Image (tube, rainbow, N blue to C red):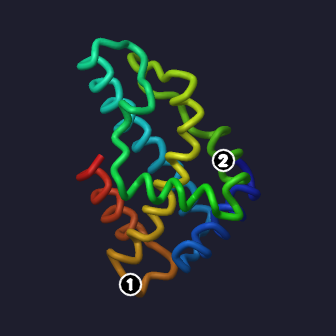
Amino acid sequence: MPGPSGTVVFGRFFREVAALRMDRNDVKRFQEFVDEMIDAIAITGRNVARWNGRDVIAPQDLPLTRGLQERIREFDKHADAPDIRRLLAQVVRRPPADVTFSEETEDLLPELFGGLSIALARTFRIVDPNVVNPGEEHWERVTDAFRQIL
């Protein structure tokens, strides 16, 4: 996330959502997590769209589980949501070259990653209920868990 403002906003967000202390390195890992998840979601959406005879990914093509939909709604109510949407819109990288999102899908991406952010923060607590400042091992475990389901 660009500059210290991203670190401050995400630090506050993760502290409020799961009582985690995130430093600059964690914010960098979070950006890597978001990049990896957008690829996974984009590829799944592309495959679903192709199975339905379309080249453009519509919102209904994305793998949005009930739990993720609930986190998206929760994110929408969070006080830091406007700042996080702005930051995510600046840094979410483009999907692979063979993926095309519809305009509605593009608009949904910041919400999707806001919901994923809440799920990510709470997953740290599931992996280690006592974690305060996630280390590399925590990040690996949590990212592996998301790889299993996305």
Relative to residue 53, is residue 117 drawn left or right?
A: right
Q: Amino acid at mark 1?
A: Pro
Q: Nearer the viewer, mark 2 or mark 1?
A: 2
Task: Tell how many labels.
Answer: 2
User: Picture coordinates of residue 64 (x, y %)?
Assistant: 37, 45
**Which residue is drawn at the image coordinates 67% and 38% (left, top)?**
90
Q: Residue furthest bottom?
A: 130
Q: Nearer the viewer, residue 147 or 29?
A: 147
Q: Helix, strand, or loop for circle 2?
A: helix
Residue shown at the point (51%, 21%) measured from the top left: 102
Rounded to the nearest angstrom, the CA distance separating label 2 from label 1 is 28 Å
- Residue tagged by mark 2? 85
Q: What is the secondary structure assignment of the residue under circle 1?
A: loop
- Residue located beneath label 1 in the image: 129
Q: Nearer the viewer, residue 22 or 53?
A: 53
- The residue under label 2 is which amino acid type? Arg
Q: Quadrant of residue 47?
A: top left
Q: Position of residue 54 (x, y in %)?
A: 35, 13
Q: Position of residue 100 (x, y in %)?
A: 46, 19
Image mark for residue 46: none
* Residue drawn at x 32%, y 75% as measured from the top left: 127
Task: State if disc 1 and disc 2 touch (CB < 8 Å).
Answer: no
Residue occupying image coordinates x 28% and y 59%: 145
In the rendered view, tell whether residue 39 sits above or below residue 76: above
Give the mark nearest the N terminus, 2 or 1. 2
Label 1 environment density (alpha carbons within 10 Å; few <14, some 14–19, many ≥20): few
